[in-house]
Amino acid sequence: MGQPVVHFEIIGRNPERLREFYGELFGWRFHTGDAATEQVSAPGQYGFVDGSTTGDGTVITGGVGGGPGFDGHVLFYVGVPNVEEALKKAESLGGKRRMGPEGTPGTLVVGRFTDPEGNLVGVAGTA
């Protein structure tokens, strides 16, 4: 099997309102704090979805964040062993690096690229 989707993000200019919306819509609760990097969300504005609120506890982790100056988008992250290597491979296949690697090696490292059609995709790992 290939690499799995491991995280999603919903980013916008009013993250508190977005968390209210998705919380009411889907019953999600959030643990609000900081994203792995300030390029993802303003400090203290990233709400991680509490997996225990999604029924049987099986969930792709996710977050809702952003803040003033952040353009709205929805993004998914694919788990990879090495973010830098994944970004280089994406570039070699015609993609464009948009961010990263960013984060703390050994804990969480993220990057973003656009595919040849311009769609934004994230990669995440510990290296």
Image (cartoon, rainbow, N blue to C red):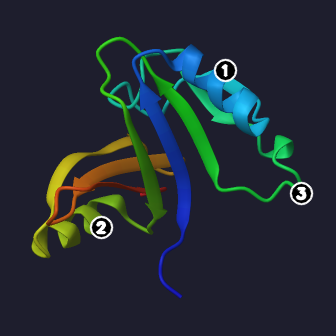
Query: Residue type at mark 2?
Result: Ala
Mark seen at residue 83:
none
Task: Please name the residue that numbered disc 1 is placed on.
Answer: 20
Q: Position of residue 29 (x, y in %)?
A: 77, 30
- The span from disc 2 to disc 1 (Cα, nearest Å) is 34 Å
Determine the residue positioned at 55% across, 31% down: 64
Q: Nearer the viewer, mark 3 or mark 1?
A: 1
Task: Mark 3: give few (<14), some (14-19) or many (20+) Cα within 10 Å.
Answer: few
- The span from disc 2 to disc 3 (Cα, nearest Å) is 32 Å
Classify residue 50 as left or right of residue 78. right
Q: Nearer the viewer, residue 119 or 99?
A: 119
Task: Please name the residue that numbered disc 3 is placed on.
Answer: 56
Q: Nearer the viewer, mark 2 or mark 1?
A: 1
Determine the residue positioned at 48% across, 83% down: 2
Marks 2 and 3, the one that precedes in the sequence: 3
Task: Please name the residue that numbered disc 2 is placed on.
Answer: 86
Quadrant position of the C terminus in the picture: bottom left
Query: Residue type at mark 1?
Result: Glu
SS at circle 3? loop
